[in-house]
């Protein structure tokens, strides 16, 4: 059975509660909770985190830590805000956090990540480096750095950030990442993953000893509500 992560939009709390309940009943492995999905996801409110936790007690709750839209190069005050948001996410019931920091050279900002990881490790939070990974120029080098930093997961479509294409288009890159990641860091495959293409994606994966899961947002939505049948198709 495929391991499934569902991305939920936190903006409408009533809909959020309903969607979290559906995910829980459907046996979703993990929720990534984000606000403002129209700008690719920002840090959700504390109330949204609490509501999701209450309605999704059986799976893993990962919270987006992204203080603003735009690039992933943050000033010191923004990093301080991110650190505070990590602490507050834990207090609200999160199991982990999702973030990424890139420097002006489109490389991982190692110092910034180390600072934030110090807090996550102290709080025993899981960590995912989000699709800022796809904005990095030398992604294979970056993957080795993420392993050294001890991130638990990396989210990728295999396609460069802000360019057209989905996980099927990026499958060759994804397979390279899987080979490099091995068993050390889980690769979360994102980018248009849906019931319509999950079989084609899984057929073309070269897993070896790699750990992989699948991330879906619009692919499991039907009029803003989670479609339990779509989740079932993703799982099998």
Image: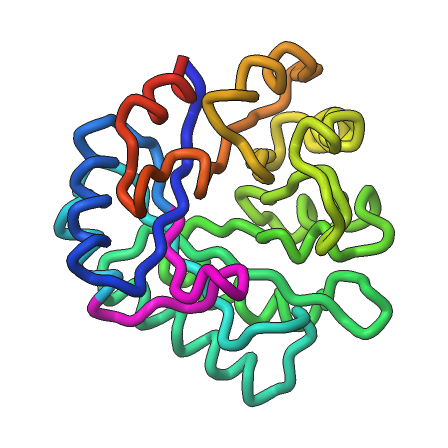
Residue at 51% from the left image edge and 83% from the top image edge: 80
Taking the magenta stretch, the answer to whether it contains residue 2 is: no
- Residue pictured at 65% horizontal, 16% vertical: 207
Picture quarter containing residue 75?
A: bottom right
Q: In which quarter of the image is the C terminus?
A: top left
Q: What stretch is highlighted in magenta?
A: 32-47
Residue positioned 23% across, 27% down in the render: 26
**Magenta residue check for 41:** yes
Residue in the picture at 16% in, 41% down: 21
**Relative to 150, is 75 above or below?**
below
Q: Position of residue 32 (x, y in %)?
A: 40, 49
Foreground residue, 156 or 40?
40
Relative horizontal placement of residue 109, taking residue 141 as reference (left or right): left
Q: Is residue 55 left or right of residue 205?
A: left
- Residue 120: image quadrant is bottom left
Count of picture labels: 0
Quarter occupied by residue 210: top right
Is 207 rendered above or below residue 60? above
Is 70 left or right of 1, judged from the image as shown? Answer: right
Colour theme: rainbow
Classify 184 as above or below 205: below
Residue 127 appears at what percent x and percent y? 49, 51
Residue 214 at x, y percent in the picture = 50, 31
In this view, which residue lies farthest toward the bottom? Answer: 77
Q: In which quarter of the image is the N terminus?
A: top left
- Quick one: 86 or 118, which is closer to the camera? 86
Against 80, residue 41 (above or below) is: above
């Amino acid at each position: 059975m495929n391991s499934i992560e569902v991305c939920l939009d936190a903006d409408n709390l009533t809909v959020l509660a309903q969607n979290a309940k559906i995910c829980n009943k459907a046996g979703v492995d993990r929720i990534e909770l984000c606000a403002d999905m129209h700008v690719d996801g920002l840090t959700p409110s504390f109330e949204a985190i609490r509501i999701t936790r209450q309605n999704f007690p059986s799976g893993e709750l990962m919270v987006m830590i992204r203080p603003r839209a735009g690039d992933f190069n943050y000033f010191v005050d923004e990093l301080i805000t991110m650190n505070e948001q990590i602490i507050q996410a834990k207090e609200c019931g999160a199991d982990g956090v999702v973030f990424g920091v890139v420097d002006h050279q489109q490389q991982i900002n190692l110092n910034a990540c180390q600072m934030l990881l110090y807090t996550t490790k102290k709080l025993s939070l899981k960590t995912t480096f989000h699709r800022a990974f796809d904005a990095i120029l030398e992604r294979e080098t970056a993957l080795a750095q993420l392993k050294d930093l001890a991130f638990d997961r990396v989210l990728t479509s295999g396609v460069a950030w802000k360019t057209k294409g989905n996980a099927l288009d990026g499958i060759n890159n994804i397979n390279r990442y899987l080979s490099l990641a091995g068993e050390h860091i889980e690769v979360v495959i994102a980018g248009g993953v849906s019931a319509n293409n999950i079989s084609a994606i899984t057929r073309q994966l070269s897993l070896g000893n790699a750990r992989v899961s699948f991330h879906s947002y619009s692919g499991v939505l039907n009029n803003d509500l989670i479609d339990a049948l779509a989740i079932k198709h993703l799982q099998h």
